[in-house]
Image (cartoon, helix red, strand yellow):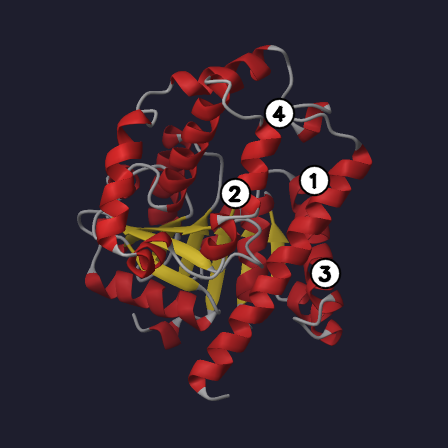
Amino acid sequence: MDVDEIHKVAVVGGGQMGAGIAQEFATAGYNVALQDIDQRQLDTAADRMRSSLMLLAEYGLLEATVVEPVLERVDRTMDLEAAVGDCDIVVEAVTEEVELKQDLFRALAELCPGHAILASTTSAIHPDKLAEATDCPERVIVAHFGIPNFLIPLVEMARAAETSDETTGTVFALLKKIGKRPIIMKKPLQGFIANRLQFALLREALHIISQDAATPEDIDTAVQNNFGLRYAVSGPLAVYDMAGLDVVLKVAAQTVPDLATDDAPFDFIRNKVAEGKLGHGTGEGTYPWTEDSIIALRRRLTDGMIAIEKWRRQQEGAESGT
């Protein structure tokens, strides 16, 4: 199936991830069916989409006049068969439970048209575990979106052993068409790329805390005001090329042997969880949180990410000559 033959998109799972994916396809002009087993979840999804679209309009990344047309292109339903029965691609975005996803993929293989691509936005589950639950493994693939979808361009693609080149190429082209930055892993690894890198950083941050070498505030300040600035515009490997790989090796020889290699640093988080200090939802995690400080953090993140998105679009326009 060619990308131009995709007209109807279905998204299964109306949570934050599913709502965001539905919004992205609808913004790109596709008719979308968003399905969930909970009507309240679907109602919340509509509110989330409207809020996200209005935010984009507020920052000048979207015309306010397109908000309602985008929302009208998303048909919210609790009926799975009605949602996927005439779709060309379905993106699964339900809870990260292997058996639940496998059961869903079995159902999708039966309910979707014979040409439809079955994609999952799982953040960790191996695509083979999903493909083996179907009789059409050649049409199964992982397309892992980031959150918030409307500001994170990356989509990590991972093939199952029997995923066809046609399926892979079509999904890649579709993601590019809706403005995403897809990458195709040479082979799937647990957690794919972004999560593996993020958790490696988190483990070392917690290790530094466990050694009583710095406070959480020190660590966040170091990331914000040093390499975090570079990584917003260039990846680590390109940055290290700039530094010189001979220099990198010398620093690595002194530093790497002392880095954490086990999960002991996560005792910091285990203890917080045991104390009921889970983060924003409980008013305290690594830091104490109030309603005002939560709003302020979300606003800072949004402002920063939108500034980067505007810069990215300017760069792409300059490169394309538009």
- The quarter holding residue 90 reads bottom left
In the rendered image of this protein, does residue 299 appear above or below residue 101? below
The answer for how far apart the CA atoms under marks 1 and 2 are is: 38 Å
Q: Disc 4 marks which residue?
A: 286
- Sequence-wise, the earlier of marks 3 and 4 is 3
In the rendered image of this protein, does residue 74 appear above or below residue 119? below
- Sequence-wise, the earlier of marks 4 and 2 is 2
- Sequence-wise, the earlier of marks 3 and 1 is 1
Secondary element type, mark 2: helix
- Where residue 160 appears, as percent x and y from the top left, is 23, 47
Quarter of the image with the N terminus is bottom left
> Does the residue at mark 3 contact the one at mark 1 (Cβ under 8 Å)?
no
Which is in the foreground here, disc 3 or disc 4?
A: 4
- Where residue 240 appears, as percent x and y from the top left, is 32, 54
Q: Disc 3 marks which residue?
A: 55
The answer for how far apart the CA atoms under marks 4 and 2 are is: 16 Å
Which is in the foreground here, disc 3 or disc 2?
A: 2
Quick check: 166 left or right of 33? left
Which residue, as the protein is rendered here, is positioned at the far right? 292
Secondary element type, mark 3: helix
- Sequence-wise, the earlier of marks 1 and 2 is 1
Secondary element type, mark 1: helix
Which residue, as the protein is rendered here, is positioned at the far left? 162
- Where residue 229 appears, as percent x and y from the top left, is 52, 54
The answer for how far apart the CA atoms under marks 3 and 1 are is: 23 Å
Q: Amino acid at mark 1?
A: Arg
Q: Disc 2 marks which residue?
A: 223
The answer for how far apart the CA atoms under marks 4 and 1 are is: 31 Å
At x 62%, y 66%, the residue is: 73
- The reply to whether residue 27 is in sight is no
